[in-house]
Image (spheres, rainbow, N blue to C red):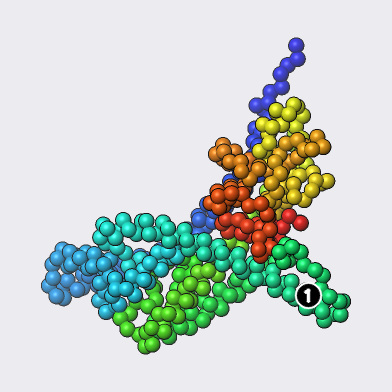
Amino acid sequence: MPRRRNVSNSCCLPLHLNEDNARFGLLAALILLYLLCGAVVFSTLEHPSELQAHKRWEEQLANFTQQNSINLNSLESLLKQYEEAFVAGIRVDKLRPRWDFSGAFYFVGTVVSTIGFGMTTPVTIAGKIFLIFYGLIGCAATILFFNLFLERIITMLAYIMRWCHEHQLRRSGVGGVESRSEDDSLEGWKPSVYYVMLILGIAALLIACSASALYSSMEDWDYFESFYFCFVAFSTIGFGDLVSSQRESYDAQEAYRLGNCLFILMGVCCIYSLFNVISIIIKQTLNWILAKLDRCRAQCPCHGRPYRRRGKVCCCCCFPQILSQHHNHHPPQGNSRQRAQKRNAVHPALPNEAAGKQRFTNASVETVCDSETDAGLGPDGGYLTGRRLSGEMISVNDFMANKVSLAILQKQLSETAHGNPRQSHVRQNGFSGGVGAFAIMNNRLQETSVDR
């Protein structure tokens, strides 16, 4: 009787991860490491200053009580009352009213933009309840506005690229410009994600520098403090340590408040779009790291065969095996019912399939075409590795198991909102539609194009 192989003594227990799950886990680990590094840096920089501030305050408090013969407990009670008044907007220096129309408008602007400086907060129960529902709708609408702003930036760059190419053809005397595709499509003019990042970065820097010059002259901040405020406000971090337009009066007050609102609006749009573009580059980096780990694991001499531990453990085999979608998979063997059960699984398309029936996945980013082809048996008996029909609902189990991508779910939500599936995959501006920042950038940049 043959002896069973002792798999428990292998170099490392097998661990199979879906590519999406591996990317998610790697990103979570890197974010945790990033947080730990940030905590170490800020603790090193700021903790000594905090200790000195506590020491100075205790000395000032002791000196004040001794010089003025004031009971320390009474003084601390007064300071606590001032802290409560501070939350309500009461300051030692005279500031603008918090809840007149202009102050309330400034407040709702910080709410819907998710900046939330914290200088003004509702104190009544009715105001807090209204804020919950008001912010729920307002924040969602503002995020949609930011996404549409990003969409128009990419479309504008595509128009500029096409115009420059046509202008170059005219100057070179090649002849008339070739006829454009249906609906004046921009599918062939996809700007690089690095160009978009550069343009958005330059625009945000120019806005921040111009706004800093305004704030340093109107708020009596130095230029670096003004620039720091611009980043905190534009990125919607909103600490509230510096807040613009809070004094009771300014020179050219109305013009300054209008300019302040416009600078914050333009800055938030540019920084939000820049963050989304940078996220594409981060995803490319994660895919590169996963590819390196998978290649290192595949080249390990002990890969694919268990062996007994003899005092050493192979580090390469401890990497989880990534079930990549980049390699060609043959259609499953079996009857048609078994194939139908796997109709919603995502498979890479074969090279000879039509472009509209493919799901492209490369080392940089996933792209889902808007094909309405369903997976299953094709007219020639072949196995079509497409995606779901537009009218077919996505189950929670499939989504949690990463059998469908987020872009498909976003497309279905968009179709449900419109009441019916969109029959065309080309929009008026020549790009495929989508919901959310990733769906908007999907197949509109060179790095997310199905042509790569």
Q: Residue at x 59, y 49 (%)?
A: 420
Toward the viewer: 416 or 9?
A: 416
Toward the viewer: 145 or 279?
A: 145
Q: From the image, which quarter does the C terminus lie in?
A: bottom right
Q: Residue at x 23, y 68 (%)?
A: 85
Up the image or down, 8 lies above or below 315; here it is above
Q: Residue furthest right?
A: 174
Q: Position of residue 379 (x, y in %)?
A: 79, 38
In-image side of 186 versus 111 (left or right): right
Q: From the image, which quarter does the N terminus lie in?
A: top right
Q: Residue furthest top?
A: 1
Q: Pointer 1: what residue?
A: 166
Q: Position of residue 400 (x, y in %)?
A: 56, 40
Residue type indicated by callout 1:
Glu
Residue 285 visible in the snapshot: no
Q: Residue at x 68, y 54 (%)?
A: 424
Up the image or down, 324 lies above or below 31; here it is above
Q: Residue at x 74, y 47 (%)?
A: 358
Say which quarter of the image contains residue 393.
top right
Say which quarter of the image contains residue 447.
bottom right
Q: Position of residue 41 (x, y in %)?
A: 49, 62
